[in-house]
Image (tube, rainbow, N blue to C red):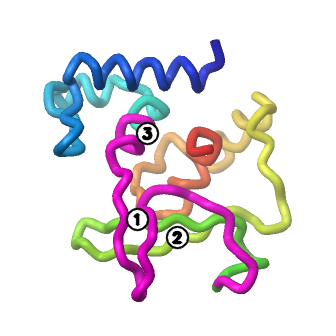
Amino acid sequence: MKPSDELRKIADDLAESSEIDPMGGSVTDLSSDEYQDLDDDTILIIEGSLEKESAEYKGKKVKLNKPRYLRKGEPGYGKKQYVVYVKKDDGKVKRITFGDANLRAKPSDPKARESFRARHRCHLKTDKTTPGYWACRFPANW
């Protein structure tokens, strides 16, 4: 079983055991200590599967918390590689671009992944409204 399949199974098991409120989009039965004990990938899958909402950004409907490639003609094309829209605490939608347009990630190489996470100090990136958060979690999002 691939690691991504294992994480999906964990997320499905949590959903079936009603530790997740599918209507409210929050983890209800887990205490804050139990929630913090989950690894980052599991939390990302749980939160990502619950936050399949969309919002409006400058008059356009956009999907939240779903990174995608920048398209030709979009602001930032040629400078950054990916874009994601997130909702800030105050309710406003923020556009975040990340990733060097001239480099390619190597998520299948464990040493490259480990070096990237150490170099960028990924264990400290917890704010969804920053490019570093999304760059550090890039392989888990795709």
Give the quadrant of the N terminus: top right
Q: Nearer the viewer, residue 139 or 62?
A: 62
Which region of the structure is painted magenta?
45-74
Q: Is residue 79 left or right of residue 14?
A: right
Q: Secondary structure at mark 1?
A: strand
Tell which circle, 3 or 2, labels the residue nearer the N-terminal end: 3
Q: Position of residue 91 (x, y in %)?
A: 24, 72
Mark 1 near mark 2, Cβ–Cβ under 8 Å? yes
- The residue at 30%/21% (across/down) is 14
Q: Which mark is residue 96?
A: 2
Q: Position of residue 115 (x, y in %)?
A: 73, 38
- The residue at 38%/22% (across/down) is 12
Q: Secondary structure at mark 3?
A: helix
Say which residue label 3 marks: 44
Q: Is residue 10 left or right of residue 5?
A: left
Q: Which mark is residue 86?
A: 1
Q: How far apart are the two marked residues, 3 and 2, measured between alpha carbons?
A: 17 Å
Q: Nearer the viewer, residue 13 or 136?
A: 13
Three-letter amino acid code at the position of disc 1: Val
Give the quadrant of the C terminus: top right
Q: How far apart are the two marked residues, 1 and 2, measured between alpha carbons?
A: 8 Å
On whether residue 30 falls in the magenta region, the answer is: no
- The residue at 45%/34% (across/down) is 40
Three-letter amino acid code at the position of disc 3: Leu
Q: Nearer the viewer, residue 77 or 116?
A: 77
Q: Secondary structure at mark 2?
A: strand
